[in-house]
Image (cartoon, grey):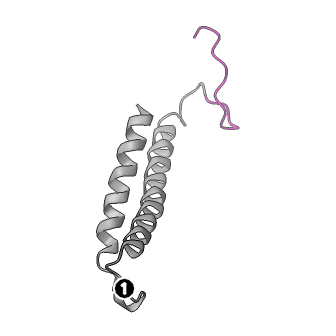
C-alpha cells in the first residue's frame, strides 16, 4: 500500500511543482526559455521539487500513523516496538 501511495504522491508532487514553476519568468533567467534544453531544465527542477514535496508528505503520513501507537501499552519508552513471537 505504501508503494502505491509513494508513486501517487510523487506524481502529484511533480504536477504541483510543474504548475508552480509555470509562474517563474524564465526569460529573465535564460536567453531562449522556449527551447528544448530549457524545457528539460524545467522538467528536472519540477521532478526534484516534486519528489521533495512527496517525500515530505510521505514522512508526515508515516509519522502520524506512528503517533496512533505511541500510547499503546506494547510500545517501550525508548520508542521501539517489542518483538511479537506469535506473528
Q: Quadrant of the N terminus?
A: top left
- Residue 77 in percent (x, y) is at 68, 36
Magenta-highlighted residues: 75-87
Front residue (pair 39, 57): 39
Front residue (pair 64, 78): 64
User: Helix or strand or loop: what does disc 1 sit on?
Assistant: loop
Residue at image position (47%, 55%) is 56
Q: Is residue 62 magenta?
A: no
The count of marks equals 1
Q: Quadrant of the C terminus?
A: top right
Q: Is residue 28 above or below residue 66?
A: below
Q: Is residue 78 above or below residue 58?
A: above
- Residue 60 in percent (x, y) is at 46, 50
In which image quadrant can residue 29 be found? bottom left
- Residue 84 in percent (x, y) is at 63, 15
Q: Is residue 81 magenta?
A: yes
Front residue (pair 74, 48): 48
- Label 1 neighbour load within 10 Å: few <14, some 14-19, many 20+: few
- Residue 10 in percent (x, y) is at 40, 50
In which image quadrant can residue 41 be found? bottom left
Q: Which residue is mark 1?
A: 32
Amino acid at each position: 500500500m505504501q508503494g502505491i501511495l509513494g508513486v501517487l504522491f510523487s506524481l502529484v508532487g511533480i504536477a504541483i511543482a510543474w504548475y508552480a514553476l509555470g509562474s517563474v519568468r524564465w526569460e529573465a533567467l535564460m536567453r531562449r526559455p522556449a527551447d528544448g534544453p530549457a524545457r528539460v531544465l524545467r522538467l528536472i527542477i519540477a521532478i526534484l521539487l516534486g519528489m521533495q514535496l512527496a517525500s515530505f508528505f510521505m514522512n508526515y503520513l508515516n509519522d502520524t500513523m506512528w503517533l496512533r501507537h505511541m500510547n499503546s501499552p506494547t510500545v517501550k519508552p525508548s520508542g521501539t516496538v517489542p518483538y511479537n513471537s506469535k506473528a
